[in-house]
Amino acid sequence: MTDPIRLGIFGFPVAHSKSPEMHRAAARALGIALEYDRFEVGPDDLATEVKAKHDERIDGYNLTVPHKQAVITLLDDVVAGARAIGAVNTVVLTDDRYVGHNTDAPGLVRSLEEAEVRIDEARVVIVGAGGAARAAVVGLADAGAAEIAVLARRPEQGDALVESLVGFVECTLEAAPLSEADWHFDSATLVVQATSATLGSNPRANEFAAMLPIDALPPDAAVVDMVYEPLKTAVLMRAEARGLKVVDGLGMLLYQGAIAFEMWTGLPAPLEVMREALRH
């Protein structure tokens, strides 16, 4: 009997993660033996726990908040795209070495393509300057966006993100304070909400959404929120009320997971099975 593919996800907290159900459902659909567990590990214990899993020769794993940056120094190698983003969300045992990847960037792009949102020559505004925003910048720039503006509550964080990606992306890239959002929203064709501010657990989510100048967006603009809990965030509800195209975070979660599944198994991911698992 073939040994199961052994996988998991490191996070803190991690009980909310839908990745185990998604990957287990995919494995059942394909008839392959696969184990996918949750590893709730605090920042102080990450190095010890990752080393233990490496010693056990785990086949691969995902990382979620707050470990996507910290894991980089614990790996044997990191591919160029993930190194440019400065974050790893997927690790694959390759030729006896643990190699870090970032599937968030292509996952976002695929979710937008599925929703028929035009990326080529897009004028993009990204709200946020953390790891999710970095992945969005790299993914959208690679997909042909013409201009990307990174808006952050803390301007120095946005400046640092842009400065670190100069030379890695070919589109026009700038940073600005979130307080200047009106001017940037006025000409945007795509807005990406890349902070945790719209999470259902945040009591100030509605206040954050009300602060964004959604009414300034052109009528043909699209708005995506990378948050998927809830699916219809306060930002998306405001955009939808304006009649704008909206994209929730479930598609990005699906596609980043599908890309990782294919890396681990070498098999095409059963997308509809995985999508149904996420919805339930």
Image: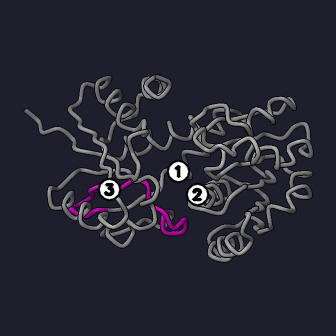
| Res. 41 mark | 3
In the image, the segment drawn in magenta is 82-98
Cα distance, mark 1 to mark 3? 21 Å
Cα distance, mark 2 to mark 3? 23 Å
Q: Residue shown at 29%/64% (left/top)? A: 45
Nearer to us in this view, 208 or 178: 208
- The image quarter containing residue 138 is bottom right
Nearer to us in this view, 189 or 242: 242
Q: Which numbered disc, 1 or 3, marks the residue that appears first in the sequence? A: 3
Asked if disc 1 and disc 3 are in contact, CB closer than 8 Å, the reply is no
Q: State the residue position of label 1.
A: 104
How many numbered marks appear?
3
Q: Secondary structure at mark 1?
A: helix
Q: Name the kind of residue labelled 1 in the image.
A: Asp
Q: Which numbered disc, 1 or 2, marks the residue that appears first in the sequence? A: 1
Residue 210 at x, y = what percent?
Answer: 82, 44
Q: Secondary structure at mark 3?
A: loop
Q: Residues within 10 Å of mark 2 (few under 14, many from 20)?
A: many
Asked if disc 1 and disc 2 are in contact, CB closer than 8 Å, the reply is yes
Tell whether 85 sits left or right of 170: left
Work out whether 97 lies above or below 7.
below
Q: Which numbered disc, 2 or 3, marks the residue that appears first in the sequence? A: 3
Q: State the residue position of label 2.
A: 135
Residue 238 at x, y = what percent?
Answer: 80, 35
- The image quarter containing residue 111 is top right
